[in-house]
Each structure stands twice: as structure tokens, then as C-alpha cells.
Amino acid sequence: MPPALDAPELAYRWSGPADPSAPTVVLLHGLGDSGDCWPDAVRRWSADYRVVGVDLLGHGSSPRFTPVQLASPDPMEAMYAAAEATVSQVAAAHGGRVLVVGHSMGGGIAGALAARRPDLVAGVVLEDPAWRDPAERVQPRGIVRERVAECRAFADDPAGQLEKGRADNPTWPDVELAPWVESKAQVDLAFLDLGIANLLEPWDQLVAAIEVPTLVLLAERGGPVTPAVRGRAAELANPQVDIRVVDGAGHCVRRDRTEEFHAIVDPWLAALA
């Protein structure tokens, strides 16, 4: 399926070898983050890959959602269309299919790319993807209000939130904290107020349709992938999908268990590249 012609141009930045034929890894962030929220991974990967950090629609420096997009049956499809168009642009510029790493909401988008556009994607890593069933995809209003208020607090007091984040997340690489704080002040609050972070198309249909190598790293505690959902994913028995649970990890696996994350992901990417 071709990229949507009206998909907005997304902001992205890249690091790594100047050689356009170098293997390319596209990073798709989670809800409330941005393409800058991967500094530790970029440091590790940019010696061998062109690493492209994308600001998804409504995040970072990318365009905001339009009122028409927000009122559509599934605003997440607008986010997907813009991501697909951007990945297509990056792939064309860098000589072929790309690798994609996505976290949470970005993991859902990356999985959809793997299912819908195997011509663009050579393989994907899904870090605790937003696999929620359609009936449960809209978060309760209380959670949504807290999330919106939290983003406003980050904008009002970034220094205070930075110190709080450092205290609350002692295992995170310190380099991750400042871009994480900054990203919260850049979120489209009208989109955030919808309380959604995954496509309306059922996650299990997308996973069943994946035809490219896919590594799924799941949190042992918390996160959208419940034990029941984990079991259903395994029952799909898609031979392209390798599902692993990272001991002790919360929803942001790469920050909570950084060395464990890279011990699994780095050789997997290298084998594909």
C-alpha cells in the first residue's frame, strides 16, 4: 500500500556514517517522547548504522494533529501514514529497506509497518509495544487527565522534573533524562487528551501478518502487554516473530535494563544488517 499522499512531513535527525549505503535504523518513540529520546542507543549504534530518530505526528518538532485528523475514526492511522511516508523517504535516500526499532506506541507503528510494508522494512524490534485490544485502547479519563497534567508540569518546571525523574528512575542512563523531560513539553495535548496510543486495527491481526524478522522485548512488570496478551501473541506462532521477556524490566526496557536490552538487540540487528 503506497504512503498516504496527504501525510505531513515529519521532523527527524540522523547520526552515523556519512556513507548512504550504510545500514539504516529508524527509531520510533513512545507516547510523550520524541526522536531525541534515544541518546544511549544512538551512542552505541551510530558507529555502525545511520540512526534516524523520527518525531511522530504530534510529538517533538513534527506537525500537530489537525482537527479533521483528531475527529477521524482512528487518529492513529494519521500517525501511521506520516511515519510510513517518512520511512519510505529515508529508505529511498539510503539505498533500500531499513531496520526499525519502536517503543510502546512507536512499537505498534513499527509492527504495522512490518505487516503492511515489508518492501520498506527489513526487520523490526518492538520494545514493549502498545498491544491493546480495540475495546481497551482508550485509557480511562482519570489516567488521561493525569498524563496531560504531567506534561504541563514538565513544561512549567523542567529542572524540577529532571531531578524527580533521576530519583524515580535510578537505573536509567543519565543521558536519557534531559531529552525525556524536554519531549514532554512538546506533545500535542489535544492528541494526548484522546487517551489512545495504538491503531484501531487489532494488534493480533497485524502480528499475524508480519512477514519480516521481528524481535519483541517485553517488560516483566507493568506495560500494556499483559500476561494474557503475551500468551495470545505466542499462540499466533508466527515464525517471524521472536518474543522475549526481559527480567526486571518495566515498560521502557532499554532504560530500565540497558545492558540486557543491548545484549539481545545489538547482535540481532547486526545479523540482519
Image (cartoon, helix red, strand yellow):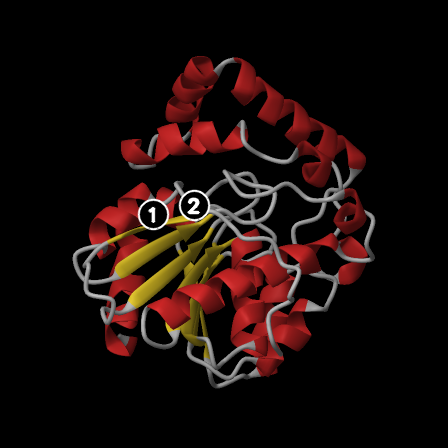
Q: What residue is rendered at 40% in x and 41% in y?
A: 37
The mark that comes first in sequence, 1 or 2, is: 2
Q: Relative to 209, does residue 88 appear above or below in the rendering?
A: above
Count up the numbered dots. Answer: 2
Rendering coords of residue 168 (x, y %): 43, 26
Which quarter of the image is occupied by the N terminus?
bottom right
Secondary structure found at label 2: loop
The image quadrant of residue 117 is: bottom right
Left or right of residue 143, residue 222 in this image: left
Secondary structure found at label 1: loop
Q: Which of 147 and 96 is in front in this view?
A: 96
Q: Relative to 31, does residue 262 appear above or below in the rendering?
A: below
Give the residue type that dot 1 points to. Arg
The image quadrant of residue 209 is: bottom right
Can residue 268 be seen here?
Answer: yes
Give the residue type that dot 2 points to. Gly
Rendering coords of residue 235 (x, y %): 60, 79
